[in-house]
Image (cartoon, coloured by chain):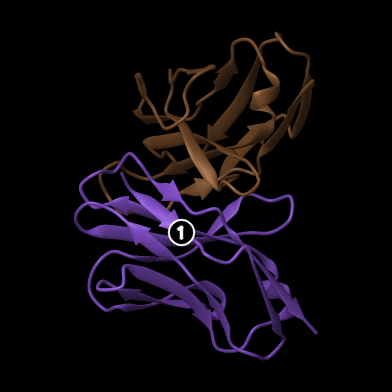
Amino acid sequence: NAGVTQTPKFQVLKTGQSMTLQCAQDMNHEYMSWYRQDPGMGLRLIHYSVGAGITDQGEVPNGYNVSRSTTEDFPLRLLSAAPSQTSVYFCASKRTPGQPYEQYFGPGTRLTVT
Amino acid sequence: AQSVAQPEDQVNVAEGNPLTVKCTYSVSGNPYLFWYVQYPNRGLQFLLKYITGDNLVKGSYGFEAEFNKSQTSFHLKKPSALVSDSALYFCAVRAASNDYKLSFGAGTTVTVRA
Protein backbone atom coordinates (compact mmCIF):
# COMPACT_ATOMS: atom_id res chain seq x y z
CA ASN A 1 0.00 0.00 0.00
CA ALA A 2 1.20 3.47 -0.86
CA GLY A 3 -1.10 4.89 1.83
CA VAL A 4 -2.07 8.54 1.27
CA THR A 5 -0.25 10.30 -1.56
CA GLN A 6 -0.26 14.01 -2.39
CA THR A 7 0.97 15.94 -5.40
CA PRO A 8 2.70 18.26 -5.89
CA LYS A 9 5.13 18.45 -2.96
CA PHE A 10 5.81 22.14 -3.56
CA GLN A 11 3.98 24.84 -5.51
CA VAL A 12 4.38 28.57 -6.02
CA LEU A 13 1.39 30.52 -7.32
CA LYS A 14 0.75 34.14 -8.12
CA THR A 15 -2.21 35.90 -6.54
CA GLY A 16 -5.35 35.13 -8.50
CA GLN A 17 -4.15 31.89 -10.06
CA SER A 18 -6.06 28.67 -9.53
CA MET A 19 -4.78 25.18 -8.99
CA THR A 20 -5.73 21.74 -7.75
CA LEU A 21 -3.94 19.82 -5.03
CA GLN A 22 -4.24 16.11 -5.59
CA CYS A 23 -4.82 13.49 -2.90
CA ALA A 24 -5.27 9.75 -3.32
CA GLN A 25 -5.47 6.79 -0.96
CA ASP A 26 -5.38 3.08 -1.70
CA MET A 27 -6.74 1.79 1.60
CA ASN A 28 -10.44 1.92 0.61
CA HIS A 29 -11.08 4.48 3.34
CA GLU A 30 -14.48 6.12 3.33
CA TYR A 31 -13.48 9.28 5.19
CA MET A 32 -11.06 11.79 3.68
CA SER A 33 -10.17 15.30 4.75
CA TRP A 34 -8.00 18.32 3.99
CA TYR A 35 -6.15 20.36 6.61
CA ARG A 36 -3.90 23.36 6.46
CA GLN A 37 -1.00 23.75 8.87
CA ASP A 38 0.19 27.20 9.87
CA PRO A 39 2.88 27.98 12.45
CA GLY A 40 1.51 28.18 15.98
CA MET A 41 -1.99 27.20 14.89
CA GLY A 42 -1.87 23.45 14.57
CA LEU A 43 -3.96 21.86 11.83
CA ARG A 44 -7.29 23.33 10.76
CA LEU A 45 -9.91 21.35 8.87
CA ILE A 46 -10.79 22.78 5.44
CA HIS A 47 -13.21 20.23 3.95
CA TYR A 48 -14.03 16.60 4.50
CA SER A 49 -15.86 13.74 2.81
CA VAL A 50 -17.57 10.69 4.29
CA GLY A 51 -17.83 8.85 0.99
CA ALA A 52 -17.96 9.25 -2.76
CA GLY A 53 -20.33 12.05 -3.71
CA ILE A 54 -20.53 13.47 -0.17
CA THR A 55 -18.52 16.47 0.99
CA ASP A 56 -18.91 19.08 3.70
CA GLN A 57 -17.18 22.16 5.04
CA GLY A 58 -14.76 22.20 7.91
CA GLU A 59 -13.44 25.04 9.98
CA VAL A 60 -11.81 27.18 7.24
CA PRO A 61 -13.51 26.39 3.89
CA ASN A 62 -13.50 29.83 2.24
CA GLY A 63 -11.52 29.97 -0.98
CA TYR A 64 -11.41 26.20 -1.42
CA ASN A 65 -13.57 23.67 -3.26
CA VAL A 66 -13.59 19.89 -3.12
CA SER A 67 -15.30 17.00 -4.86
CA ARG A 68 -15.27 13.25 -4.31
CA SER A 69 -16.17 11.31 -7.42
CA THR A 70 -14.35 8.13 -6.35
CA THR A 71 -13.43 6.55 -3.03
CA GLU A 72 -9.73 6.91 -3.81
CA ASP A 73 -9.41 10.58 -4.80
CA PHE A 74 -10.18 13.84 -3.00
CA PRO A 75 -8.76 16.88 -4.83
CA LEU A 76 -8.67 20.34 -3.27
CA ARG A 77 -9.15 23.31 -5.59
CA LEU A 78 -7.98 26.83 -4.92
CA LEU A 79 -10.24 29.05 -6.96
CA SER A 80 -8.29 32.33 -6.86
CA ALA A 81 -5.14 32.06 -4.76
CA ALA A 82 -4.42 34.68 -2.11
CA PRO A 83 -1.27 35.21 0.01
CA SER A 84 -3.31 34.14 3.07
CA GLN A 85 -3.46 30.67 1.55
CA THR A 86 0.29 30.24 1.85
CA SER A 87 0.49 27.16 4.03
CA VAL A 88 1.27 23.47 4.19
CA TYR A 89 -1.68 21.34 3.14
CA PHE A 90 -2.26 17.82 4.40
CA CYS A 91 -4.72 15.25 3.15
CA ALA A 92 -5.82 12.52 5.55
CA SER A 93 -8.06 9.47 5.47
CA LYS A 94 -9.55 7.01 7.89
CA ARG A 95 -11.42 3.79 7.61
CA THR A 96 -15.02 4.49 8.53
CA PRO A 97 -16.91 7.59 9.56
CA GLY A 98 -18.52 7.35 12.95
CA GLN A 99 -15.82 5.14 14.44
CA PRO A 100 -12.86 6.37 16.51
CA TYR A 101 -10.19 5.25 14.08
CA GLU A 102 -6.99 7.23 13.68
CA GLN A 103 -6.34 9.22 10.53
CA TYR A 104 -3.55 8.51 8.06
CA PHE A 105 -1.83 11.60 6.69
CA GLY A 106 -0.15 12.28 3.39
CA PRO A 107 3.32 13.90 3.18
CA GLY A 108 1.92 17.37 2.55
CA THR A 109 2.02 20.07 -0.14
CA ARG A 110 3.89 23.29 0.64
CA LEU A 111 2.12 26.15 -1.15
CA THR A 112 3.43 29.68 -1.48
CA VAL A 113 1.24 32.43 -2.94
CA THR A 114 3.06 35.60 -3.98
CA ALA B 1 -16.88 24.69 20.77
CA GLN B 2 -14.17 22.12 21.25
CA SER B 3 -10.53 23.05 21.64
CA VAL B 4 -7.10 21.77 22.61
CA ALA B 5 -4.38 23.62 24.49
CA GLN B 6 -0.74 22.62 24.46
CA PRO B 7 0.71 25.11 26.92
CA GLU B 8 4.36 24.59 25.99
CA ASP B 9 5.67 25.57 22.56
CA GLN B 10 8.94 23.77 23.27
CA VAL B 11 10.13 21.02 25.57
CA ASN B 12 13.84 20.30 25.97
CA VAL B 13 15.12 17.20 27.73
CA ALA B 14 18.34 15.22 27.96
CA GLU B 15 18.47 11.76 26.45
CA GLY B 16 17.52 9.15 29.01
CA ASN B 17 15.39 11.55 31.04
CA PRO B 18 11.60 11.35 31.27
CA LEU B 19 9.64 13.28 28.67
CA THR B 20 6.22 14.86 29.25
CA VAL B 21 4.20 16.84 26.71
CA LYS B 22 1.12 18.50 28.16
CA CYS B 23 -2.37 18.69 26.67
CA THR B 24 -5.67 19.93 28.01
CA TYR B 25 -8.94 19.88 26.12
CA SER B 26 -12.47 21.19 26.06
CA VAL B 27 -15.32 19.28 24.43
CA SER B 28 -19.01 18.62 24.93
CA GLY B 29 -19.67 15.13 26.17
CA ASN B 30 -17.21 12.28 26.13
CA PRO B 31 -13.91 12.92 24.35
CA TYR B 32 -11.88 10.87 21.95
CA LEU B 33 -8.25 11.96 22.33
CA PHE B 34 -5.29 11.42 20.03
CA TRP B 35 -1.57 12.12 19.90
CA TYR B 36 0.26 12.52 16.59
CA VAL B 37 3.94 13.14 15.87
CA GLN B 38 5.41 15.02 12.91
CA TYR B 39 9.02 14.63 11.86
CA PRO B 40 10.59 17.38 9.69
CA ASN B 41 9.07 17.63 6.20
CA ARG B 42 6.78 14.67 6.85
CA GLY B 43 3.08 14.13 7.44
CA LEU B 44 1.63 13.37 10.84
CA GLN B 45 1.93 9.87 12.28
CA PHE B 46 -0.48 8.41 14.79
CA LEU B 47 0.99 7.59 18.23
CA LEU B 48 -1.94 6.62 20.45
CA LYS B 49 -5.56 7.31 21.33
CA TYR B 50 -7.97 7.25 24.23
CA ILE B 51 -11.51 6.12 23.52
CA THR B 52 -12.77 4.58 26.73
CA GLY B 53 -11.64 2.27 29.51
CA ASP B 54 -8.22 2.33 31.17
CA ASN B 55 -7.00 5.88 31.73
CA LEU B 56 -3.42 4.91 30.87
CA VAL B 57 -2.98 4.32 27.16
CA LYS B 58 0.13 2.80 25.64
CA GLY B 59 1.18 3.57 22.10
CA SER B 60 3.97 3.41 19.56
CA TYR B 61 7.70 3.91 20.23
CA GLY B 62 7.34 3.52 24.02
CA PHE B 63 4.97 6.46 24.46
CA GLU B 64 2.02 6.46 26.81
CA ALA B 65 -0.61 8.99 27.81
CA GLU B 66 -2.82 9.41 30.83
CA PHE B 67 -6.42 10.54 30.52
CA ASN B 68 -7.59 12.62 33.47
CA LYS B 69 -11.26 13.49 33.20
CA SER B 70 -11.42 15.81 36.22
CA GLN B 71 -8.48 17.88 34.94
CA THR B 72 -9.50 17.48 31.27
CA SER B 73 -5.95 16.53 30.44
CA PHE B 74 -4.25 13.96 28.26
CA HIS B 75 -0.50 14.33 28.81
CA LEU B 76 1.95 12.36 26.68
CA LYS B 77 4.84 10.65 28.46
CA LYS B 78 7.90 8.60 27.78
CA PRO B 79 10.00 7.24 30.65
CA SER B 80 13.35 7.56 28.85
CA ALA B 81 13.65 9.94 25.90
CA LEU B 82 15.79 9.27 22.82
CA VAL B 83 17.40 11.79 20.47
CA SER B 84 15.20 10.29 17.73
CA ASP B 85 12.09 11.45 19.66
CA SER B 86 12.90 15.03 18.64
CA ALA B 87 9.86 16.12 16.63
CA LEU B 88 6.65 18.16 16.68
CA TYR B 89 3.85 16.62 18.74
CA PHE B 90 0.15 17.34 18.33
CA CYS B 91 -2.72 16.55 20.65
CA ALA B 92 -6.18 16.29 19.09
CA VAL B 93 -9.73 15.88 20.39
CA ARG B 94 -13.16 15.17 19.03
CA ALA B 95 -16.47 14.67 20.72
CA ALA B 96 -17.57 11.05 20.77
CA SER B 97 -20.85 12.21 19.26
CA ASN B 98 -19.27 14.14 16.38
CA ASP B 99 -17.08 12.22 13.98
CA TYR B 100 -16.50 15.04 11.61
CA LYS B 101 -14.52 17.58 13.55
CA LEU B 102 -11.12 16.73 14.95
CA SER B 103 -9.50 19.72 16.65
CA PHE B 104 -5.73 19.95 16.96
CA GLY B 105 -3.56 21.80 19.41
CA ALA B 106 -0.89 24.20 18.16
CA GLY B 107 1.83 21.61 18.67
CA THR B 108 4.84 21.20 20.97
CA THR B 109 8.37 20.94 19.62
CA VAL B 110 10.38 18.37 21.54
CA THR B 111 14.16 18.50 21.44
CA VAL B 112 16.11 15.69 23.05
CA ARG B 113 19.81 16.47 23.47
CA ALA B 114 22.44 13.78 23.56
| Label 1 element class | strand
Q: Residue at x 46, y 35 (%)?
A: A33
Which residue position holds label 1?
B5
B8 sits left or right of B30 in the view: right
The image position of residue B81, as x and y in percent, is: 64, 83
Q: Chain of mark 1?
A: B
Residue type at numbered disc 1: Ala
Viewer-proximal residue among A99 and B21 = B21
Q: Is residue B110 above or below residue A94?
A: below
> Can you tell which quarter of the image residue A113 is in?
top right
A70 sits left or right of A51 in the view: right
> Can you tell which quarter of the image residue B107 is in?
bottom right
Q: Residue at x 51, y 26 (%)?
A: A73
Viewer-proximal residue among B106 and A74 = B106
Chain A display color: brown
Chain B display color: purple
Q: Residue at x 74, y 50 (%)?
A: B41
> Can you tell which quarter of the image residue B15 is in?
bottom right
B28 sits left or right of B16 in the view: left
A82 sits left or right of B59 in the view: right
Q: Is residue A88 above or below residue B3?
A: above
The image position of residue B79, as x and y in percent, is: 55, 88
Q: Is residue A63 above or below residue A84?
A: above
Q: Residues within 10 Å of mark 1 (few under 14, many from 20)?
A: some
Q: Residue at x 49, y 19 (%)?
A: A62
Quadrant showing the N terminus of chain B: top left
